[in-house]
Image: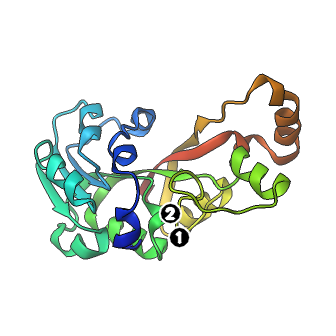
């Protein structure tokens, strides 16, 4: 991961630590025995993986990494590019990278590196923010603004932005086959905005409803 350490240290740790991601359970494959989670936070996602397994984590927040070490089998503290040489090749049958790839300067190099860590039939599970999300489109088109924030689509640590179409292209061009992909965390619209929202959805498409996309892929 290549976002600045100073920048990430300025984010709200409480917001970061509270993230559990139960909506990503549906993307887990039926079988797995060795998991690597990039951006494992404090290690809570392991609770959502019901099968016994060897569980590794990579975590750039030092405080979160220390907590994760009490829950996971092995935790590497640092950004992925700093610790990737400590991660064995051809070892993991499941890699999880929830809300990670948007922080990577060269996401294609990141994906190629992950492929080396995966066994032949391994799965890669990701969640990726959707830049065409309704709230972001509203700010861009109606308010004519593109303001970076501490959280959300325009998080100040985001280096790359994706749509449903560009996610598919990125994964396919880097040698992955999509097994499951769908929008997650749909927008909640106040009743007074409902007619306007449905008009925008009709014009721009259903994908604007979702804050993120969840994806499960395999190597080609």
Q: Residue at x 10, y 44 (%)?
A: 70
**Alpha carbon of mark 2 to alpha carbon of mark 1: how far?**
6 Å
**Residue 82 visible in this rendered orientation of the protein:** yes
SS class of the residue under badge 1? loop
Looking at the image, tell me whether mark 2 or mark 1 is earlier in sequence order. Answer: 2
Image position of 36 (left or right of 197):
left
Query: Are dots 2 and 1 in contact, CB under 8 Å?
Result: yes
Q: Position of residue 95 (x, y in %)?
A: 32, 53
Whether residue 68 is situated above or below residue 118 in the rendered picture: above
Q: Residue at x 16, y 41 (%)?
A: 53
Q: Residue furthest top?
A: 191
Mark 2, residue position: 102
Image position of 156 (left or right of 126):
right
Mark 1, residue position: 159
Whether residue 15 is situated above or below residue 50 in the rendered picture: below
Image position of 9 (left or right of 99):
left
Q: Nearer the viewer, residue 78 or 27?
A: 78
């Amino acid at each position: 991961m290549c976002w600045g350490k100073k920048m990430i240290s300025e984010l709200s740790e409480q917001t970061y630590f509270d993230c559990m991601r139960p909506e990503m359970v549906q993307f887990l494959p039926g079988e797995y025995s060795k998991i690597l989670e990039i951006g494992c936070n404090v290690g809570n996602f392991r609770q959502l993986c019901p099968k016994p397994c060897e569980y590794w984590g990579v975590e750039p927040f030092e405080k979160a990494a220390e907590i994760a070490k009490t829950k996971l089998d092995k935790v590497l503290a640092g950004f992925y590019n700093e610790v990737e040489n400590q991660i064995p090749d051809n070892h993991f049958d499941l890699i999880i990278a929830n809300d990670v790839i948007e922080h990577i300067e060269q996401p294609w190099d990141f994906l190629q590196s992950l492929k080396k860590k995966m066994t032949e039939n391994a799965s890669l599970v990701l969640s990726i923010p959707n830049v065409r999300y309704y709230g972001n489109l509203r700010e861009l088109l109606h308010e004519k603004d593109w303001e970076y924030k501490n959280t959300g689509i325009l998080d100040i640590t985001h280096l790359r932005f994706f749509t449903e179409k560009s996610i598919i292209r990125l994964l396919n061009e880097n040698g992955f086959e999509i097994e499951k992909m769908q929008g997650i965390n749909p927008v909640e619209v106040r009743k007074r905005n409902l007619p306007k929202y449905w008009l925008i959805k009709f014009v721009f498409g259903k994908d604007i409803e979702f804050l993120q996309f969840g994806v499960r892929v395999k190597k080609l």
